[in-house]
Image (tube, helix red, strand yellow):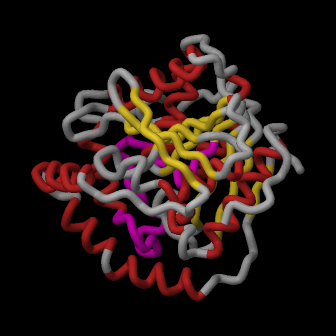
Amino acid sequence: MSLDRDVTPDYPLSWQARALTGLMRGTLKPASHLLLRHPLALDCASRLGGLAGAVPVPEHVTVTPAAFAACGGEWVRAGQELDEGKVLLYLHGGGYFWCSPRTHRPITWRLSAAARRPVLALDYRQGPVHKLADSLSDALEAYGCLLERGYDAADVIVAGDSAGGHLTLATLLALRDRGLPLPSAGICLSPWADLTDSPRRANRWQDPILPAGRVRWLARRWTDGLDPRDPLVSPVLGDFTGLPPLMIVTGSTEVLRDEARRVALRARRAGVPVTYEEWPRMPHVFPLLADVLPEARLAFRHMAGFLAAAGERPPMEDAA
């Protein structure tokens, strides 16, 4: 299978997907309109997010704490027959103010099964208390710690969703710019890659979760005092020369879809193999809904196929 390709999965839309997108359109999107308007509401949401309970995992999955100098995290292992000499560093999404490794376990345990290795889900520092530079510093430190603990860079994968997809791209660019050894591959799920003040016109009404105007408001807050055209702030504007193979997964109705496309095109122009998958009518970071969404479970099979093509491991049997 070629690593450099565009994929539009043609699975029939499940009834679960129809029901969920309708529900999210009537609940999450209006809530986002109200939430992302005032710094005080953002601070309250961040505090409440830190109190969110952990998402349950199957019996064959183990979760153990992990500690780093500036932040924490957790090790997630799906099953016993994993290659402990390899690792996947996962950077969760949540707009840089919401969510944690605990909320993203439906992704991390399935990625452990897909990659046949432990996943280190990093609890990096977030806003509004911390800055983008703090989040990036934590990601770089965690990667450095993995190398110090004996992992070879060729045995590391970096992945993330939404804001974590942004952090994944920024981490890869920063590692390359610092002349450090790069991981073997990167996976970005619905990456938020453009933090400039450009308005988002595509899918403004189709996206069932994210209001375009509120995404723009949040980008303004996180880039205050920064150059939004800095590639470490808006990776979509970066030079991807020398980066490892990338997989980008997005939904066709997402308000962030076009910046995911732009990342794929820009990376390819720099000679980076990119597997770009655009799933019809899937919502933002739909793999997070794998417990209830058949399409999301299928997406992990596609990720396993990408890793197999990248020479990482044999195709997985089942991570559903």
Q: Residue at x 35, y 21 (%)?
A: 69
Q: Is residue 65 inside the magenta stretch? A: no
**Start-end of magenta stretch:** 187-211
Q: Residue at x 46, y 54 (%)?
A: 104
Residue 224 location (% of width, % of height): 24, 34
Residue 184 falls left or right of residue 144: right
Most extreme residue toward the left is 40
Q: Is residue 199 inside the magenta stretch? A: yes
Residue 297 falls left or right of residue 37: right
Q: Residue at x 45, y 46 (%)?
A: 92
Q: Quadrant of residue 244?
A: top right
Residue 190 falls left or right of residue 138: right
Q: Is residue 320 visible?
A: yes
Judge whether 80 appears above or below 174 on screen: below
Residue 105 location (% of width, % of height): 49, 55
Q: How many marks?
A: 0
Q: Quadrant of residue 186?
A: top right
